[in-house]
Image (spheres, rainbow, N blue to C red):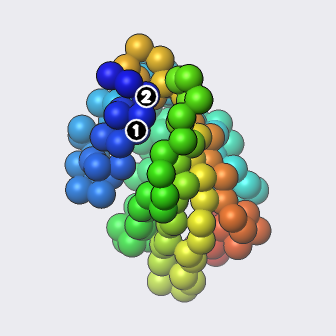
Amino acid sequence: MEPKKLIESYFDFLSKGDILQLFRLFSPNVKWHQPGRNKFSGTKNNLQELSAMLEAMMRDTAGCILIKRNGSLMVNGNTVAAPLVFSARNGKKNMGMLGTDLFRVEDDKIVEVWLFSEDQEMEDDFWNSK
């Protein structure tokens, strides 16, 4: 599958909340680079670590996280950049901003992801506030 089509599927499954299908797009040894200086920051080195982080984020927000594409996917070989908008609420605070996710695809799997946030300080404050 072309990298662009794979990432289109990623956002389709994400929008439907189909986590099982979403996780099938990842390599078991995926590297996920979570930015910032908060309790979720750092590199997750496999699907188990990524899953644990996402489950904790869902717990902290009672499932109130929304991530949507905010423009066209941009492709350079096996790397795909996705502009997006994301928001979350944790009971105490609300957060919403633009971002970009950068995906590296190999052998029809997502093998590496880098996330970029418009306001990393705001995001750090949000995730550290619970």
User: What residue is at 23 percent from the left and 56 percent from the top?
Assistant: 16
Q: Residues within 10 Å of mark 2 (few under 14, many from 20)?
A: many
Dot 1 corresponds to which residue?
Answer: 7
- The percent position of residue 94, horizontal first and vertical second, equals 54, 82
- Given the current orientation, which residue lies at the most extreme bottom position? 92
- The percent position of residue 85, horizontal first and vertical second, equals 51, 65
Dot 2 corresponds to which residue?
Answer: 3
Quarter of the rendering occupied by the N terminus: top left
User: Residue 103's image quarter?
Assistant: top right
- The percent position of residue 32, horizontal first and vertical second, equals 57, 36
Q: Is residue 25 visible?
A: yes
- Given the current orientation, which residue lies at the most extreme top position? 107
Q: Is residue 10 visible?
A: no
User: Residue 64's image quarter?
Assistant: bottom left
Amino acid marked by disc 1? Ile
Residue 98 shows which numbered tag? none
User: What residue is at 57 percent from the left and 47 percent from the top?
Assistant: 101
Q: In this orientation, which residue lies closer to the viewer: 86 or 4?
A: 4
Amino acid marked by disc 2? Pro
Above/below status of 14 relative to 1: below
Asked if marks 2 and 1 touch (Cβ < 8 Å), the reply is yes
User: What residue is at 48 percent from the left and 62 percent from the top?
Assistant: 70
Above/below status of 14 relative to 42: below
| Mark 2 vs mark 1, CA separation in Å | 6 Å
Q: As drawn, is 11 to the left or to the right of 30? A: left
Q: In this orientation, which residue lies closer to the viewer: 95 or 71?
A: 71
The number of discs equals 2
